[in-house]
Amino acid sequence: MKKIKADYPSGTRVELISMDDPYVKIPEGTKGTVVSVDDVGTIHVHWDTGHKLGIVYGEDMCRKVMQ
């Protein structure tokens, strides 16, 4: 998990590639800001849409966005 935390520090901008959440549908291509990475490797993001939902590393996919 140390690598994930190092790769996605707080404030990193990301773009959603894919997410399979049965309750919240965030469109692919949506951008957001990383708030934290927990000890399980979930990347917690505040999405520009107003959602606050984590990316499950290895299950969902995102990429860093250079500003």
Image (tube, rainbow, N blue to C red):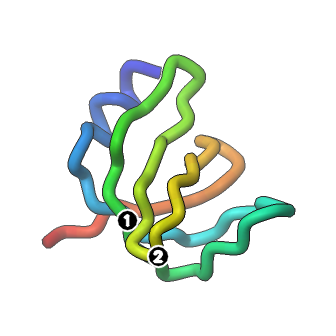
The residue located at (71%, 73%) in the rendering is: 25
Q: Residue furthest front?
A: 50
Question: Where's residue 43, x and y in %?
Answer: 48, 41
Q: From the image, tell me which residue sits under label 2.
A: 49
Question: Where's residue 26, x and y in %?
Answer: 62, 74
Rounded to the nearest angstrom, the CA distance separating label 1 from label 2 is 8 Å
Q: How many marks?
A: 2
Q: Is residue 50 left or right of residue 14?
A: right
The amino acid type of the residue labelled 1 equals Gly
Q: Is residue 12 left or right of residue 44?
A: left
Q: Residue furthest left?
A: 67
Helix, strand or loop at mark 2: loop
Q: Are marks 1 and 2 in contact (CB under 8 Å)?
A: yes
Q: Considering only vertical position in the picture, is 60 above or below 37?
A: below
The residue located at (22%, 49%) in the rendering is: 11
Question: Where's residue 64, x and y in %?
Answer: 32, 61
The amino acid type of the residue labelled 2 equals Thr
Q: From the image, tell me which residue sits under label 1.
A: 32
